[in-house]
Image (cartoon, rainbow, N blue to C red):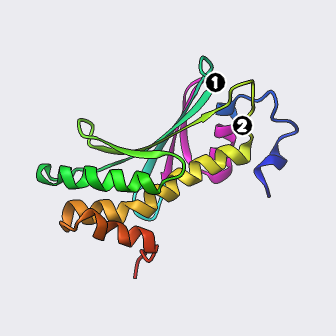
Amino acid sequence: MALIEHFDTVDDLHPIDLAEHIAEHHRWDFDRVHDDQIALVVEGQWRTYSVTLAWSANDQTLRLICTFEMEPPEDRLPALYECLNRTNDMCWAGAFTYWAEQRLMVYRYGLVLAGEQVAGPDQIDTMISAAILSAERFYPAFQLVTWAERTPVEALNVAISEAYGRA
């Protein structure tokens, strides 16, 4: 069943209300942090991802931040940063960054809804799914760069081929 079928009209629904319904639909753990913010926990193949969606009425943007813990060795940070730059060249929407102080890998995306545009449930669900899919796709490359001491180009060949998985 499409997510849109759960709603009579989405025109006057707050985007965080929609995100809450999506979390319930997928049976994800969530915490409604504030009227304008929700935190989700999504299980992936490689990691458990923390996803936060926050609505900013001032700039009419729905912000998504997807994080997972990562503790690369200090001497591998330059290679990781090069890998991130190359990864972001392959991402059409959203971008990765590493927050060293928090030891978190972060995928960020902002959906601008200027002119009183409205995000529908399928659009918000796609935002979340795209973040998780991107994290899942590039996680092996980040690990190969930091722990197997592969070059960023070698590591990203794994992500590009999409031949990753579990035996």
* Residue at left offset 72%, top offset 43%: 121
In-image side of 31 versus 6 (left or right): left
In the image, farthest residue toward the right: 8
Residue 151, numbered label: none
Q: Label 2 sits on what residue type?
A: Ala
Q: Label 1 sits on what residue type?
A: Gln
* Residue at left offset 26%, top offset 66%: 144
Q: Which secondary structure lies at badge 2?
A: loop
Please name whichever residue, 39 or 91, is drawn nearer the observer in this view of the structure. Answer: 91
Segment colored magenta: 18-42
Q: Which secondary structure lies at badge 1?
A: loop
Residue 85 position, x and y percent, is: 34, 50
* Residue at left offset 61%, top offset 51%: 27
Q: Is residue 13 above or below residue 144?
A: above
- Residue located beneath label 2 in the image: 119
Q: Quadrant of residue 154?
A: bottom left
Q: Is residue 33 magenta?
A: yes
Residue 80 position, x and y percent, is: 25, 53
